Amino acid sequence: MHRVLVMAVLTLLLAACQTTSNPRGTSADADGLTAESAVRVSSVQAERQWIQKHYPGAEVESQALLMGKVPMDLITIQLPSGEKVDVYFDISAFFGKW
């Protein structure tokens, strides 16, 4: 009986340690194709690195600051194919904190 109780407590503790998901996603699971799925980043350099990783060969065409509930960068990139893609980045981790 004692062993069952210990296992139950350990299970509850592990469940409490799990992270909750962010409705906008995280940098690991967000695609950045909409404001709702914005990629969370900690710097402008992190934005560029994310673009290079997910869109190799893409070139930044423009960048805009969007001020809403969460500050975001909207970066328009051009792929090697010529296609243009808008990518949203959640910059709340660093914007206005310098």
Image (cartoon, grey):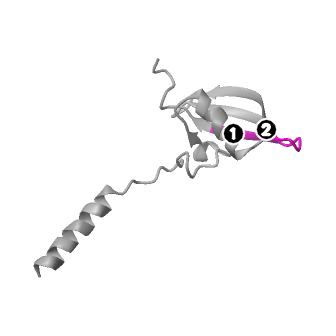
Percent across and percent down for residue 26 are: 52, 47
Residue 57 lies left or right of residue 71; in this view the side is right
Residue highlighted by disc 2? 58
Count neighbours of disc 1 (C-alpha within 10 A) and say few if under 14, some if 14 to 19, many if 20 or more: some
Q: Residue lying at the far right in this picture: please name it.
A: 82
Counting residues from the start of the chain, the first of labels 1 and 2 encountered is: 1
Numbered label attached to residue 51: 1
Q: Which amino acid does label 1 sit on?
A: Ile
Residue in the foreground of this view, choosing between 70 and 85: 85
Q: Which residue lies furthest to the left in this view?
A: 2
Q: Where is residue 6 in the image (x, y as percent from the top left)?
A: 16, 71
* Quadrant assignment, res 60: top right
Q: What residue is at 55 percent from the left and 50 percent from the top? A: 28
Q: As drawn, is 74 to the left or to the right of 2?
A: right
**Image quarter hosting the N terminus:** bottom left
Label 2 neighbour load within 10 Å: few <14, some 14-19, many 20+: many
Label 1 SS: helix
Looking at the rendering, the stretch of residues picked out in magenta corresponds to 79-88
* Marks 1 & 2, CB-CB < 8 Å contact: yes
Above or below residue 65? Residue 11 is below
50 with respect to 68 (left or right): right
Q: Where is residue 22 in the image (x, y as percent from the top left)?
A: 47, 49
The residue lying toward the viewer, choosing from 41 and 45, is 45
Q: Which amino acid does label 2 sit on?
A: Ala
On the image, the x and y values in percent for residue 7 come to: 21, 73
Q: Is residue 83 magenta?
A: yes
State the residue in front, 37 or 14: 14
Say if the magenta span includes residue 61: no
> For residue 6, which numbered disc appears in the image?
none
